[in-house]
Amino acid sequence: MKKFGKLLGIIAIVAIIGFSMTACNEDGTFATLSGEVTISPSEAAIELGTELTANYSGSETVKTYEWKKDLGTVALSSSNKYKPEEKGTYTVTVNVTGYLPKTSQPVLIIDPLTPDLTGTITVTPTEPTTGTVITASYSGTETVKFQWKKVSIGSSEIVSTSEKYTPTEVGTYAVTVSADGYKSKTLIVSVSTPTTPSLTGTISLSLSSGEITASYTGTENVTYQWIRGTTDVQGATSAKFKPTVSGFYSVRVSATGYRSKISDSLYITVTQ
């Protein structure tokens, strides 16, 4: 029995030594993995429903991938793929026998983004006057609905739910095109009296470092008014404007004795 006990003790010592040789450095500490852990897609914010893939750049053989949501484990398996079922912050930790685990940088899972409508809105005539039928057209393939509003500061009144509208008053109007499952699009239309001449120039918008610049090609002495969606932005009356809220922006150019013109809209994303 004593010989058998000694034999068991020797086996145990050998097993411990063998484990330490594979799991530790010479000084008894765990080894550090040679590679880095990343998650793809690599965007800072990823839509819910997207499958995530863990990538490990080292030569060691990964035993398990531990997916975590807000630091709590949600999946532990040999698969490097995971599809989140909830919004939140996710990381993945790779585990290799004999090495310290290594964790990726976090990624943010967000609600699926609503897609933009694929087409554009146009109106005819392009410079409508009171008493003239205005017809809105949409170039996309989605089944859309139309809505016309007369816009004034602080309010907007629905005047038609057809693609056609005949304004009886001078002012600013908005036609909105919408479809289920898509972000709506709006075009701003300026209606004037038939005797008022049109501005001779055209308007173009350019974007740089989050600031929009309006360029007008005519010779008239014009003023500017920036519009978010269908509402005038208070105090935004210069040729340059830097939005602080995401949305569709356009600019109305006016001159005394002329019908004002409104530019095409531009969608601006503002990151906080």
Image (spheres, grey):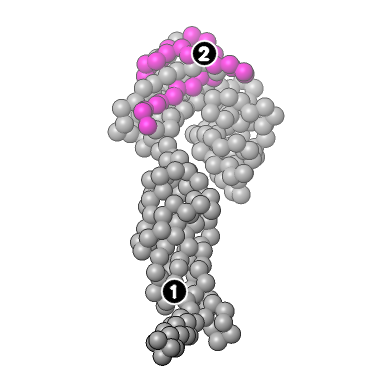
Residue 111 visible in the snapshot? yes
39 part of magenta stretch: no
- Classify mark 2: residues with Cα within 10 Å, few (<14), some (14-19) or many (20+): few
Q: Nearer the viewer, residue 22 or 103?
A: 22
Image coordinates of residue 102 in percent, x first then y, are 51, 67
Q: Residue at x 45, y 18 (%)?
A: 148
Badge 1 is on which residue?
Answer: 97
Marked residue nearer the N-terminal end (1 or 2): 1
198 to 166, vertically: above or below: below
Residue 44's label in the rendered image is: none
User: Whole-Å distance between the Cαs marked 1 and 2?
Assistant: 68 Å
Task: Say which element carries label 2.
Answer: strand
Amino acid bearing label 1:
Thr
255 to 55, vertically: above or below: above
Q: Residue at x 52, y 13 (%)?
A: 157
Image coordinates of residue 185 in percent, x first then y, are 44, 30
Q: Residue at x 33, y 34 (%)?
A: 140
Where's the N terminus, which quadrant?
bottom left
Q: Nearer the viewer, residue 3 or 84?
A: 3
Picture quarter containing residue 242?
top right
**In the image, farthest residue toward the right:** 235
Q: Which residues are magenta?
A: 152-181
Is 241 left, or right, of 101 in this rendering? right
Where's the C terminus, which quadrant?
top right
38 to 124, vertically: above or below: below
Badge 2 is on which residue?
Answer: 157
- Classify mark 1: residues with Cα within 10 Å, few (<14), some (14-19) or many (20+): some
170 part of magenta stretch: yes
Tag count: 2
Residue 42 visible in the snapshot? no
Amino acid bearing label 2:
Glu
**In the image, farthest residue toward the front:** 1
